[in-house]
Image (tube, coloured by chain):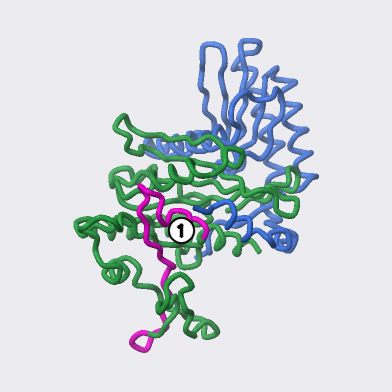
Amino acid sequence: MTTGAGTWALGEGDYQRISQHLAELLREANARCAMLVDRTGQLLASVGESLAFDPTAFASLTAADFSANDQLAKMIGEPEFASLFHQGEKESMYLADVARRVILVVLFDDRTTVGLVRLRVKHAVGDLVQVLEEIFNRGAGDKGRAAGLLEGAEDEIDKLFSD
Amino acid sequence: MSMINYASREINCKLVYYGPGLGGKTTNLEHVYNKVAPDRKGKMVSLATETERTLFFDFLPVDLGTIRGFKTRFHLYTVPGQVYYNASRKLILKGVDGVVFVADSQVERMEANIESMQNLYDNLAEYNYDLTKTPFVVQYNKRDLPNAAPIADLQEQLNPGWEVADPARQKPLPDPSHEGDFLIQQANGLWVERAPYFESVAMTGEGVFETLRHVAKLVLKTLS
């Protein structure tokens, strides 16, 4: 048994590569915004128009949405739903699995079509899988970097969570 | 699964409040939400039924502030306590960094507490997580009620402990929160470790932050 899920780290270089892929996707799909959210509900990267909503809440709901649909897939005998599409009157969103660990979310409006978005997302997922596999294989890497950083955190906890 | 983002200089940790239905998990989160300064918290999301029973989860992000240049944030989640929501309950445990088990102290709820604790072990095991190695605290809630069971009974039923196999750790470890109690002690020739416990009245906020402080520190220790 493991002691819980492994910690992993996203470095500057990783972030830039991910952002480049997301920016390329936005340009080609003519979408508004692309986000990468991990399966536990944490926002990893966001590119495109600035968001008018709380991105943290959005990310946690995205992960829950995807997880719930994963279970629905299993119930009907599918290993997974690799992508989800939510259609709104003006705004729509397309979600796709990346390497079983991360979700790519694309927000778009009537300036593009779901067909184009789907096509471009497929390409982007291929690129992102490569980047992410590298990150996961590396693990949290140099844990010591975080260790020193967390000194003094206990005082902050006492201050913040006080009656 | 904490995620350390060196690009945005953020560390995010996931804490899950687990326990039987109507035990006070959402009330814990609401108290935290009401007391934490506005600039330190995000939007609280509740996926609940019309009767305010948690359907999927409650979610509250809390910023610990910037620690050595890293914005450190705790994501607090509750699970739906009702037995038949197990599928969604299990989803929330994915990637958990720390667990608070909120037990309902009322004598009549002992059975429900035990069932929920067993369910927590089972669900974590399905993810290959080991609760004895995960930051974990038990909160005995509703201590103000006249039908609250004695702490000794609750501890015996819900927090009997697990064997300490590592010889280096086989020595008495006093419980800093309860004088005279031990987190690690020898019983019937076996070294046993128990999860730290706290008493609370979540409705008034008593014990809520004490519990949260403790589990938050345990989580940070695992990162360092």
Residue A44 in the image, given as x and y percentages of width and height: 66, 40
Residue that appears at 37% across and 57% down: B200
Asked if residue B111 lies in the magenta stretch, the reply is no
Compared to residue A156, the image places residue A79 above or below, namely above
In this view of the protein, which residue sits in the foreground, A28 or B215? B215
Query: In the rendered view, does A87 fall on the left or right side of A152?
Result: left
Dividing the picture into quadrants, the one containing residue B140 is bottom left
Residue B185 in the image, given as x and y percentages of width and height: 42, 82
Disc 1 is placed on an element classified as helix
Q: Quadrant of the C terminus of chain B?
A: bottom right
> What amino acid does circle 1 point to?
Thr
Residue that appears at 79% across and 39% down: A16
Query: In the rendered view, does B37 fall on the left or right side of A33?
Result: left
Task: Give the number of marks.
Answer: 1
Q: Chain of mark 1?
A: B
Residue range in magenta is B187-213
Residue B122 at least partly seen: no
Residue that appears at 29% across and 32% down: B51
Compared to residue A30, the image places residue B218 above or below, namely below
Q: Which chain is blue?
A: A
Mark 1 crowdedness (10 Å alpha carbons): few <14, some 14-19, many ≥20:
many
Compared to residue A106, the image places residue A56 above or below, namely below
Query: In the rendered view, does B81 fall on the left or right side of A34?
Result: left
Q: Colour of chain B?
A: green
Residue A51 in the image, given as x and y percentages of width and height: 65, 25
Q: Which residue is mark 1?
A: B211
Asked if residue B189 lies in the magenta stretch, the reply is yes
Residue that appears at 58% across and 32% down: A96
Query: In the rendered view, does A68 fall on the left or right side of B75?
Result: left
Residue A2 in the image, given as x and y percentages of width and height: 53, 64
